[in-house]
Amino acid sequence: EKTRIEIMMKIVAASVLFSAAMVGGDWSGSGKITCYGHSEVTSDINEGADNYGPGSVYCTPVEWDYDTGLGPEAIFFYPSSGAEFEIWAWDYHPSWGYGDVMPTARCTGNLWYRSQDLGAGFCTPHKNWRGCGIVECHGDITCEGC
């Protein structure tokens, strides 16, 4: 009987650890993020990789829909300490009703941005700036839902 209880306790412990690993949370730190997709840039600098200066960005990837022909949006994280990680819009589907929440990220520091996807295909229909492009920011980062 004691062995059966020990096995059950190990199964319960493994289940709790597995469930904890599946839960998304928030992350904050410093480093670099690159947003490929929808974002809001606040800065006095003009767009272009040659223009680098103070500002902030709010990266808000939209849910990926295969039927649009667009590629998925993404956010790449390069923390000053810790492992690099990525958020891909095709991994989150809030419209399917499964309770997924699309992660978002904010960065305040120094940045550059382009108001187009440079041929990558995630903003293609938007020939002019409509909040979709590429932004790289070095600074303080907060990711919600990561």
Image (cartoon, helix red, strand yellow):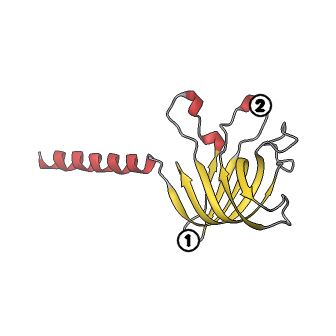
Whole-percent x and y of residue 5? 17, 46
Horizontal relation, residue 114 to residue 58: left or right: right
Q: CA distance from mark 2 to mark 1?
A: 37 Å
Q: Residue furthest front?
A: 44
Residue 50 locus on image (x, y percent)? 86, 66
Of residues 82 and 46, which is closer to you in this image?
46
Q: Which residue is mark 2?
A: 68
Q: Amino acid at mark 2?
A: Thr
| Spot occupied by residue 27 in the image (x, y as percentages of width and height) | 51, 58
Instruction: Tell me the kind of residue under disc 1.
Output: Ser
Q: Which mark is residue 69?
A: none
Task: Label 1: state its secondary structure.
Answer: loop
Instruction: Describe residue 104's horizontal placement relative to residue 1 as left or right.
Output: right
Query: Counting other residues with Cα less than 10 Å from the Cα at mark 1, is it few (<14), some (14-19), or many (20 or more)?
Result: few
Identify residue for label 1: 81
Among the two numbered marks 2 and 1 on one chain, the one whose residue lies closer to the N terminus = 2
The image quadrant that residue 80 belongs to is bottom right
> Of all residues shown, which one is farthest toward the left?
1
- Residue 42 position (above or below residue 37): below
